[in-house]
Amino acid sequence: MKKLFAVIAMLGVFAFGATQSMMAQEDSAAVATDSAAAVVDSAAVDTAAVEAAAEETEATEAVAPIEEESIHKALKTKFIEGDAGFMSLVAIALVFGLAFCIERIIYLSLAEIDSKKLMADIEEKLNAGDLEGAKTLCRNTRGPIASICYQGLMRFNDGVGEVERSVTAYGSVQASYLEQGCSWITLFIAMAPSLGFLGTVIGMVMAFDDIQAAGDISPTIVAGGMKVALITTIFGIIVALILQTFYNYILSKIESITANMEEATISLLDMCMKYNLKK
């Protein structure tokens, strides 16, 4: 009987131990499951945060204005890409050409006067018999028209023929003064595209040298020399166009002053005839 109770007690102890072990395992599995769920939730939160940050960055980039490259910076970049040696020659041609253009424009602007008013004042003094006053008026007035009139008044008492010869000779001198320096402008107009084409030829030679060195015709190999060739040509043509525009403006001013000189000469000859008839 005692042995039976001892066996039952042993079975009860083993059953209680097994039950406790199973409960412990279940608790561990539940804890592990909870931990895994927490990790998954944390990862989901982190992923959502990363996606939100990415969307915010994209929205910021979309809203932020794209800075445009300034013209000065773009020209500087292209100047360097076009080989500074040849681009410097083109830039020098532009600077010297503009210097001559500005000098001519200033000279011609100072040479322009109100020729009709001057001739009216000269005629008024001649009608009053004041030849010396007319000479003084011309001497104190700037410009080639006043100079031509002064030379004609110096021969006023010698007849119309002498006045005409004097005015014609001195008029050609004044016309040469008006055109002085224009030959340099035409030189730089011709030089600018020529230097650009020279850069083009040298750029092509560079491209063929690169092909020969690499032994392969690849766009990447040829691109450098071709870029130099095209950029130098573009800048040379642009410089020529700029100088040509100024040159045409200068020619128009020269033509205007020359026409006023011829008109003043005709008016002076008419005054000379009237003056000599009065005498």
Image (cartoon, rainbow, N blue to C red):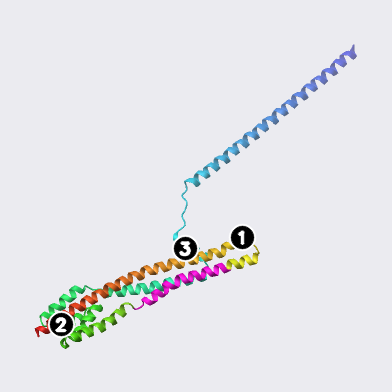
Whole-angstrom CA distance, mark 3 to mark 2, is: 60 Å
Question: Whole-percent x and y of residue 189?
Answer: 41, 72
Kindly identify the residue that appears in the image at 52 percent across and 68 percent down.
Answer: 200
Mark 1: amino acid: Ser
Q: Which residue is mark 1?
A: 218
Q: Are marks 3 and 2 in contact (CB under 8 Å)?
A: no
Residue carrying label 3: 75
Question: Which residue appears farthest toward the top when viewing the image?
Answer: 1
The nearer-to-camera label among 1 and 3 is 1
Disc 3 residue type (three-letter): Leu
- Of 213 and 105, nearer the camera is 213
Circle 2 residue = 272
Residue 131 in the image, given as x and y percentages of width and height: 14, 84
In which quadrant of the rendered view does residue 36 lie? Answer: top right
Residue furthest to the bottom: 158
- Whether 200 is among the magenta residues is yes
Residue sitting nearer the eye, 162 or 249: 162
Q: Quadrant of the N terminus?
A: top right
Q: Nearer the viewer, residue 47 or 139?
A: 139
Disc 1 crowd rating (10 Å Cα; few below 14, some 14-19, many 20+) is few
Question: Callout 3: helix, strand or loop?
Answer: helix
Kindly indicate the quadrant of the structure image that contains residue 72.
bottom left
Residue at 15%, 75% (x, y): give it: 120
- 187 falls in the magenta region: yes
Write down the region rendered in magenta: 180-205
Which residue occupies the foreground of this view, 73 or 56?
A: 73
> What's the residue type where badge 2 is placed?
Cys
Q: Of label 2 and label 1, which has the lower sequence position?
A: 1
Q: Earlier in the sequence, mark 1 or mark 3?
A: 3
Q: Earlier in the sequence, mark 3 or mark 2?
A: 3
